[in-house]
Image (spheres, rainbow, N blue to C red):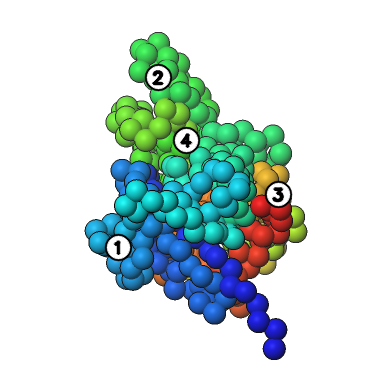
Amino acid sequence: MLHLMKQNIAVIFGGCSSEHEISLLSASYILRQLDEEKYNVTMLGITKEGRWLLYPGPVDALADGSWEKDPGCKPAFLSPDRSTHGIVVLEEGQAQVLPVDVIFPVLHGKNGEDGTIQGLFALSGIPYVGCDTLSSAVCMDKAVTHSLLNNFGIEQAHYLWFFAHRYQDPQGREKIRNKILQRLTFPIFVKPANAGSSVGVSKVSSLEELDAAVEKAMAEDGKIVVEEGIEGQEVECAVLGNDFPEVSIVGEIGASAEFYDYDDKYKNGTSQLYIPARLPEETAQEIRKTAVRAYRMLGCKGLARVDFFVRKSDGKVLLNELNTLPGFTAISMYPKLWETCGLEGPALIDRLIQCALEAHPHG
C-alpha cells in the first residue's frame, strides 16, 4: 500500500482586528475538520497586540482566548525568506525552523483578509488558502469593490463614498450631505470602507443622524461608504475554486436585528437561515451566475462568500459584497451551504488546501 507523506499545514488565527474573536471561533472549527491522518498541523496565533506565538495546546482553549496564556507558547513568525519555507520558532536564544507546505490563514477583517498578510505569504513562497494580495485588498475595500463592479456592469445598491477628512471640513461636509440627498433615498447605511462583519455600520433614517454615523464609521477607517437601504431578502452563496470555480446553492438570512450585524452573525445566533433560499429558481440561477462572474472579475482564488439583496419591489438582484475569508463557525453560512451541497467539513477543508497547492504550484 502506497504511504503518502503527511502535509505540514500551518493554521494562522487571531490577528490585530475587530474580528479577532471570530477568527478564534473559525479556527476552532477548521482545526477540528483537519484530518490528522493527512496533515501535521501547526497552530500559529496572533494576539490583538500583534505578537505571534506558536501554540501547542488544545483546540478548546482558542474560543475564549485562553490559548495566549498557555505556558507552552513560544515566540514564532513566518519567514519571508523563501529558502526558509516555514515558521521560525524562538526559544532560549535559539531559532528552530518548522517546515510548512500550506498556510491556512483563518484571519478576518483588517490585517487578515485585506491583502496585508497575503503579501507576506507571497514573499515566503509558501502556498496559502484563499485570495491573493490584490483581490483580497480589492474585496476588503467597499469603495473599490463598488467602483469595479459598477465598471463590470454588475448591479448594486446606489452608493457614494468619500474620505473622512472631507467630512470634517464644514464646506466638504455640506457638499457630501447634498450629494447624499440628491442621489440616495433614506434609510441609508453608513459604513467604513475597510472593516469586516458590519463593524462600524449604522442604519440612518434622516440627515440628523448622519454625523453620529459618520463618526462611528471613521473610528474604523478613513474612507466612508454610504449605500441606499434595500428592502428585500438578504441572500448569499459560496464560491469555491480557482480558474473554474464552483458555486453552491443560495442561502437566505432572516435577520433578527434591524440588519444582519456583528452580534446577529456571531453572538446571538438568533437569525433564521433558509437553505435553500426562498426564491424562484430563475432568480437563484441569476445570483449564482453573478457570483461566479464577480469572483472571476475581481481575481478571487480559493474561496469567497458573495452576498446579495433581492429587492422586494421588483425582484431585482443586487450584489452587496464579496467576503474573501468568510466566517467558519458552527452557524456560518459558507460551510453550511457546502454541507447542504454534499461537501462536508473535512472534505471542504481538503478542497481548499488543494486549491492553494494548485494556485501556487511552485510555492
For marks 3 and 2, give the CA distance. 34 Å
For marks 4 and 3, give the CA distance. 22 Å
Label 2 with label 1: CB-CB less than 8 Å? no
Residue 201 percent across, percent down from the top left: 38, 41
Residue assigned mark 4:
193
Give the amino acid at mark 1.
Gly
Q: Residue at x 51, y 70 (%)?
A: 40
Residue assigned mark 2:
165
Residue assigned mark 3:
296
- Give the mark nearer the N terminus: 3 vs 2: 2
Tell me, yes or no, if residue 207 can be seen here.
yes
- Give the mark nearer the N terminus: 2 vs 4: 2
For marks 1 and 3, give the CA distance. 43 Å
In the visual, does 15 lie left or right of 40?
Answer: left
Relative vertical location of residue 254 with respect to residue 87 in this rendering, above or below: below
Give the amino acid at mark 2.
His
